[in-house]
Image (cartoon, rainbow, N blue to C red):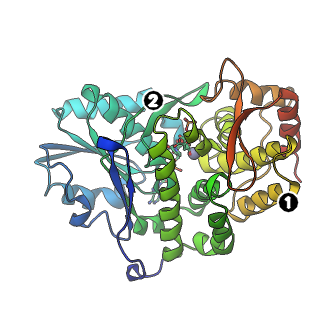
């Protein structure tokens, strides 16, 4: 990664939610910079939640820094992976909090990717009926999406993120330096959520990604800084106007109805969330074309960029005997479904999304076409 002085730091994206408002700070070296934590509570107890992959990389220095702010700093190190985003692992956070004698003023720090962030946020929402937490996202995906907006939770074997709560963090620190240790496959997964913001909200950004995709994959710090900043700006605007997804916020689910079915259907962790979303966006773009909202050129453009990001574009067969039915069954539990009717985020012209039901036969045809290599 190029030297850190090329990024004018920190960039700051505010998220306006009344008394739950907070800032997203973006820059290199933020985790170890005491200025990043200014204004946050300095209560007696802090608990850092991380995982066994991230801990050896970044836990020691964070712990040392937080010891200057909190009398006691405790840690919980979780097993790594989407397959562990469940009750059993969540319980380990509560075990750690109680064993350490943590109280209502305790601040939780989520050091890791989206899995750690979603689970720590959920633990913070539940512990003693709600304590504060800070997001320290260490993957591209978590910096551009999961650390922002307060969706927290865990998976159920029958459906993604089925148990959770809305609980906003006090601050989000997106330290770009930590991305240099991220495996290439995980970087690609993060790019899926970056690409997502184009078709739903900002085609100029989509065009910019098309020109900078190779730089992003090569960890060009300036390109990454802009990608994280613009993604967070779009997400902050959407969340500020619809915090609890009563309407508009659903557009952030573009590609996720198919994507969540792939994740659950393949077994959590087989496909990364970003991979499933990347492929799911191609499927949702096809579905938008199938109901007459966009043309084939638009679908092809989305598919090409997803492919260039290093993501899969051919959907997996979930059940050879009854593949479309299996997809449809999994999608019927989607949180956007109403009375068993699946509602899809469709692209209604470049940069604009709508939420709509689509007849099962049309969806089944798109699934069949998407599972075939082009
Ligand atoms: N709450 C939301 O709004 C929201 C939004 C998008 C995704 N999500 C959730 O986020 C999760 C996906 O997050 P993710 O893609 O960050 O996956 P992840 O948390 O599993 O992290 C990916 C992998 O990278 C490793 N890792 C993390 N930081 C690293 C670093 N700096 N260097 C080296 N390795 C590192 C992790 O240990 C893990 O193996 C899914 O569960 C998804 O449902 C939530
Ligand atoms: O923040 C949101 O709203 C999103 O939909 C962002 C998604 O990228 C994310 O994967 C989210 O967790 C999916 O939400 P869900 O409500 O469908 O579980
Ligand atoms: Zn997502």
Question: Regarding mark 2 in the picture, which secondary structure is present there?
Answer: strand
Badge 1 residue CB within 8 Å of ligand 3: no
Relative to 70, say whether 305 is above or below: below
| Tag nearer the camera, 1 or 2 | 1
Q: Which mark is residue 164?
A: 2
- The CA span between labels 1 and 2 is 38 Å
Q: Which mark is residue 314?
A: none
Relative to 86, say whether 173 is above or below: below
Nearer-the-camera pick, 59 or 197: 197
Report the residue at 43% width, 57% height from top: 138
Residue 34: % across, % down: 21, 64
On the question of residue 89 being in view, the answer is: yes
Residue 142: % across, % down: 48, 52
Nearer-the-camera pick, 204 or 104: 204
Question: Regarding mark 1 in the picture, which secondary structure is present there?
Answer: helix
Question: From the image, which quarter does the C terminus lie in?
Answer: bottom right
Q: Residue furthest top?
A: 339
Report the residue at 55% width, 41% height from top: 249
Residue 31: % across, % down: 31, 62
Report the residue marked by disc 1.
297
Dot 1 or dot 2, earlier in sequence:
2
Residue 326 location, quadrant: top right
């Amino acid at each position: 990664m190029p030297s850190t002085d090329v990024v004018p730091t920190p960039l700051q994206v505010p998220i306006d939610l009344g008394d739950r408002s907070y800032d997203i700070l973006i820059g290199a070296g933020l985790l170890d910079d005491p200025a990043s934590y200014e204004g946050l509570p300095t209560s007696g107890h802090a608990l850092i939640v991380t995982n066994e992959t991230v801990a050896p990389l970044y836990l020691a220095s964070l712990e040392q820094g937080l010891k200057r702010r909190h009398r006691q700093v405790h840690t919980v190190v979780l097993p790594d992976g989407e397959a562990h985003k469940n009750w059993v692992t969540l319980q380990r956070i509560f075990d750690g909090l109680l064993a350490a004698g943590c109280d209502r003023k305790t601040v939780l720090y989520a050091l890791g990717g989206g899995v750690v962030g979603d689970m720590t946020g959920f633990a913070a929402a539940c512990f003693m009926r709600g304590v504060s937490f800070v997001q320290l996202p260490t993957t591209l995906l978590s910096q551009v999406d999961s650390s922002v907006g307060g969706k927290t939770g865990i998976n159920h074997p029958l459906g993604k993120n089925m148990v959770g709560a809305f609980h906003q963090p006090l601050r989000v620190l997106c330290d770009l330096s930590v991305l240099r240790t991220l495996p290439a496959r995980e970087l690609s997964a993060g790019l899926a959520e970056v690409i997502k913001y184009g078709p739903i909200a900002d085609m100029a950004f989509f065009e910019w990604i098309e020109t900078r995709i190779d730089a992003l994959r090569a960890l060009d710090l300036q390109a990454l800084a802009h990608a994280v900043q613009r993604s967070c700006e779009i997400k902050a605007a959407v969340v500020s106007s619809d915090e609890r997804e009563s309407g508009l916020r659903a557009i952030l689910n573009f590609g996720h109805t198919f994507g969540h079915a792939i994740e659950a259907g393949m077994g959590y962790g087989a496909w990364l969330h970003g991979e499933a979303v990347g492929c799911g966006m191609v499927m949702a773009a096809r579905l938008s074309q199938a109901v007459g909202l966009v043309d084939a050129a638009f679908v092809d453009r989305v598919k090409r960029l997803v492919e260039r990001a290093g993501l899969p574009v051919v959907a997996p067969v979930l059940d050879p005997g009854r593949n479309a039915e299996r997809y449809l069954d999994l999608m019927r539990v989607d949180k956007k479904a109403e009375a068993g009717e699946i509602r899809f985020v469709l692209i209604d012209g470049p940069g604009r999304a709508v939420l709509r039901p689509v007849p099962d036969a049309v969806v089944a045809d798109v699934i069949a076409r998407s599972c075939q290599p082009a």
